[in-house]
Image (spheres, helix red, strand yellow):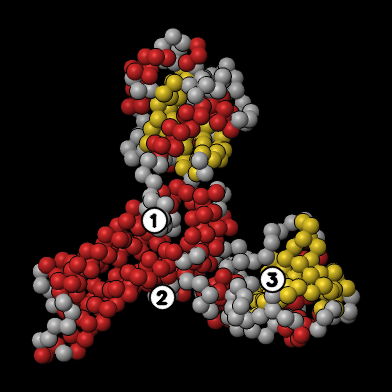
Amino acid sequence: MHFIKNLKEPIIALATATGVAAISVIRISGTQIIPLFQPFFLGKNPEKFKSHSIYLGFIIDENGKKLDQVLVSFFKSPKSYTKEDVIEISCHGSPFIVQEIISLFLRNGIRLAQKGEFTLRAFLNGQMDLSQAEAVADLIAANSEKSVQLALDQMRGGFSKEISLLREELIHFASLIELELDFGEEDVEFANRADLEILVQKLLTKINALKSSFQWGNVIKNGVQTALIGRPNAGKSTLLNALLNEERAIVSEIPGTTRDTIEELIHIDGIPFRFIDTAGIRNAEDQIEALGIEKTREKIATAQLLIYLFDAELVSMDEVQKDLSALSLEGKSILVVANKIDLTELASDYIREGIMGISAKEKIKIDSLKQKIFDLVLSDIPEQDQTVISNLRHYEALSLAEQALSQVENGLHNARSGDFLAMDIRHALAYLGQITGEVGVEDLLEHIFSKFCIGK
């Protein structure tokens, strides 16, 4: 990571969104930023700034020209986001003014921040661990109430504490086994093998619980890909409009109206579901419709949940089963829904078959359908106080730690020597340490922080 070598240099970036706004905030961080900032602030002497205070004044250029009237917030090290001195300039939100101010400081000893560099400095300076730093990015990207809460919980360090406790207990035994290796010729045993086995089983149980929470956490963070599928004129576009409570998709009696997929985000009980309205599945009558049907099959392949909608008036259960058997449904949740039940006398028959009946046009049973969708995908919700993981990197590290601990367990059962046990324990500690950054490499940091926005 090329800018790890330049962490002593002061940095600057726009911390708010780009574009025209009432207010924009420009952030500066570094160990010696006051002398660099002082010549360009017309107001209270920056050398006399008090931490966590705000000052009104003007930003002026090298020639004394006023660029903008601003409010300057000062946070003195170590009580700042990065644990360095931090200045935040609240200026008027003109892109021209923002660029003028940033360019001024770029000409005078401050460089532009890289992606995620403010948070990277916070991590490297001990303000937060790596999993908490990743939670900052998750919070910025959160698009639902539950994803915000999940990111906040991780930022507060709940998951980090779980991992630290796991490592601390294992480190104790690791040190005892390492000590045994120093006395290898004397055949001594400092680490009680029975106690170590109990600990390993306890750790494996805890890791398994954390891994099990990933499905729920991933749903909260990324949402559920949900494809509306079925024959032409089944009412898929009408159902999408009913779920959204707005006329988003074009509805027509002409079969094959939907030629391309339409995607919309719908929140059900705080969970984001990305609904995809697809082209009706049939033998295409023209090339454009064929492309739409091919896209439908692509969306079916990537969706977690399929809602197969059929016309209760025109399509029999045998035809429904024939349609479903032609699709690749392995590993997917599927909900079969009979539409237009207001127009048929067979509604009770479908209920007896376990098929849910709705009327998308008349909005009958739409709320019940939403609840059914939620229950189908999220039937196994963790306890309220249970730590939930949502980061794939954390899940993979836990899986590797689980494998290493399983090797320790096998080694204990087979009376393997202390050097092999020590090696597997070191591996487990390293994988757990990668989650919080206690064990890390530059390539890992590059991968994580390159996904941040510039001003964070």
The answer to whether residue 360 is above or below residue 176 is: above
Q: In front: mark 2 or mark 1?
A: 1
Image coordinates of residue 427 in percent, x first then y, are: 29, 72
The answer to whether residue 380 is above or below residue 325 is: below
At 52% across and 44% down in the image, what residue appears? 270
Query: Which quadrant would residue 33 be assigned to in this image?
Result: bottom right
Image coordinates of residue 349 in percent, x first then y, are: 37, 14
Helix or strand or loop: what does disc 2 sit on?
Answer: loop
Q: Earlier in the sequence, mark 2 or mark 3?
A: 3
Query: Label 2: which residue?
Result: 438
At 73% across and 83% down in the image, what residue appears? 34
- Residue 68 visible? The answer is yes
Query: Label 1: which residue?
Result: 386
Q: Amino acid at mark 2?
A: Glu
Query: Label 3: which residue?
Result: 27
Disc 2 to disc 1, C-alpha distance: 23 Å
- Residue 237 visible? The answer is no
The answer to whether residue 375 is above or below residue 361 is: below
Judge left or right: residue 341 versus residue 8.
Answer: left
Query: Which quadrant would residue 159 be assigned to in this image?
Result: bottom left
Q: Which class describes the residues within 10 Å of circle 3: few (<14), some (14-19), or many (20+)? A: many
Q: Earlier in the sequence, mark 3 or mark 1?
A: 3
Helix or strand or loop: what does disc 1 sit on?
Answer: loop
Residue situated in front as seen by the camera: 358 or 26: 358
